[in-house]
Image (tube, rainbow, N blue to C red):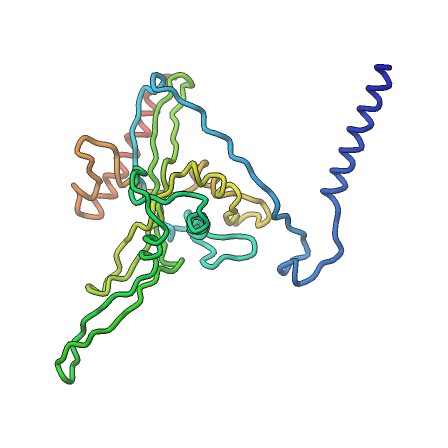
């Protein structure tokens, strides 16, 4: 009797496996311009990648800890997979489109600060993205003051920078130097009609663990193999981006540009902090 039950169980398992295999390998011959988007290869859009949860860290296991804010310049070749495509395509969106879509759909909460204390409503974000400015000009012919209105819009190609707030700590229980991103913020280059210049404007902050699932299902460009998927979450987790440190936790709570006004000095200070972190981690071990 037991042998019969075992045989029946194995038979059912094999039937289920064959059914799943048949379902996955089923090929539809109905290929046309309306469903293939210019390719003969059937694409699967129903994937739902899961994210591995972070390892919980107890306070007593943290031997060293600091927080940092870094800027990711999207115009650099290393970071351009997060910038392109400027307009969404059938297969890919840029990072800002993914984040903005999550905010508009209400899937994530936007904040006005990097510490996630002040919630930002969608109306305020829309106001930053598009607003009408009243400008006073002088008529050269009559000398009279002419009032005109100008619409300021933030376009996807004006998102030139991404700020990330992260923490680094040494977990003595696992004997590992760990780094985890806490927040992410798109920065736009917005026109200032009063000065006729463009200023960097932080649009909103998002709590990174809340958007990880969305980023895990959003692809970035792979220049070596267009069909090999690499998600945005993998891009951040593997630290494939190039960044410049703007802030290291300190007693005065100052950013680098608060005590270094020259751009060159800011870059040198950021590089000094990076080398300090690298040397600190190296000196933890003896060979």
174 or 47, which lies in front?
Answer: 47
The answer to whether residue 159 is left or right of residue 102 is: left
Residue located at (26% from left, 38% from top): 247
Residue located at (34% from left, 29% from top): 168
245 or 217, which lies in front?
Answer: 217
Residue 38 placed where, x, y %? 63, 60
Q: Can residue 142 be seen in this snapshot?
A: yes
287 or 194, which lies in front?
Answer: 194
The answer to whether residue 131 is left or right of residue 195 is: right
Q: Quadrant of the C terminus?
A: top left
Query: Image quarter for residue 266?
Result: top left
As drawn, the residue found furthest toward the left would be 143
Q: Does residue 100 sit above or below 283 in this rendering?
A: below
Residue 212 placed where, x, y %? 46, 39
Q: Does residue 15 sit above or below 84 in this rendering?
A: above
Query: Image quarter for residue 210?
Result: top left
As drawn, the residue found furthest toward the bottom would be 141
As drawn, the residue found furthest toward the top would be 2
Q: Can residue 81 be seen in this snapshot?
A: no
The answer to whether residue 280 is left or right of residue 104 is: left
Residue 166 placed where, x, y %? 34, 35
Residue located at (38% from left, 31% from top): 179
Q: Quadrant of the N terminus?
A: top right
Q: Does residue 74 sit above or below 32 in this rendering?
A: above
Query: Image quarter for residue 118?
Result: top left
Q: Does residue 167 sit above or below 132 in this rendering?
A: above
């Amino acid at each position: 009797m037991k042998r019969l039950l075992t045989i029946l169980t194995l038979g059912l398992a094999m039937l289920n496996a064959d059914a799943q295999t048949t379902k996955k390998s089923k090929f539809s011959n109905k290929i046309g311009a309306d469903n293939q988007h210019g390719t003969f290869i059937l694409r699967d859009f129903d994937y739902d990648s899961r994210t591995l949860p972070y390892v919980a860290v107890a306070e007593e296991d943290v031997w060293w800890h600091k927080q940092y804010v870094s800027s990711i310049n999207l115009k650099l070749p290393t970071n351009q997979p997060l910038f392109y495509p400027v307009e969404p395509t059938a297969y890919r969106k840029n990072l800002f489109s993914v984040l903005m879509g999550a905010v508009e759909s209400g899937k994530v909460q936007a904040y006005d600060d990097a510490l996630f204390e002040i919630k930002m409503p969608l109306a305020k974000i829309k106001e930053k993205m598009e607003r009408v400015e009243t400008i006073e000009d002088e008529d050269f012919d009559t000398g009279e003051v002419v009032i005109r209105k100008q619409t300021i819009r933030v376009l996807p190609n004006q998102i030139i920078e991404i700020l990330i707030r992260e923490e680094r700590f040494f977990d003595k229980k696992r004997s590992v130097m760990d780094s985890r991103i806490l927040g992410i913020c798109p920065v736009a280059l917005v026109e200032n009609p009063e000065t006729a210049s463009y200023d960097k404007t932080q649009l909103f902050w998002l709590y990174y663990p809340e958007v990880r699932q969305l980023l895990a299902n959003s692809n970035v460009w792979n220049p070596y193999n267009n069909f090999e998927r690499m998600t945005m979450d993998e891009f951040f987790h593997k630290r494939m981006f190039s960044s410049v440190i703007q802030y290291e936790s300190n007693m005065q709570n100052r950013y680098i540009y608060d005590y270094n006004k020259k751009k060159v000095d800011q870059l040198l200070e950021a590089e000094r902090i990076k080398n300090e972190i690298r040397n600190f981690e190296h000196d933890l071990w003896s060979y």
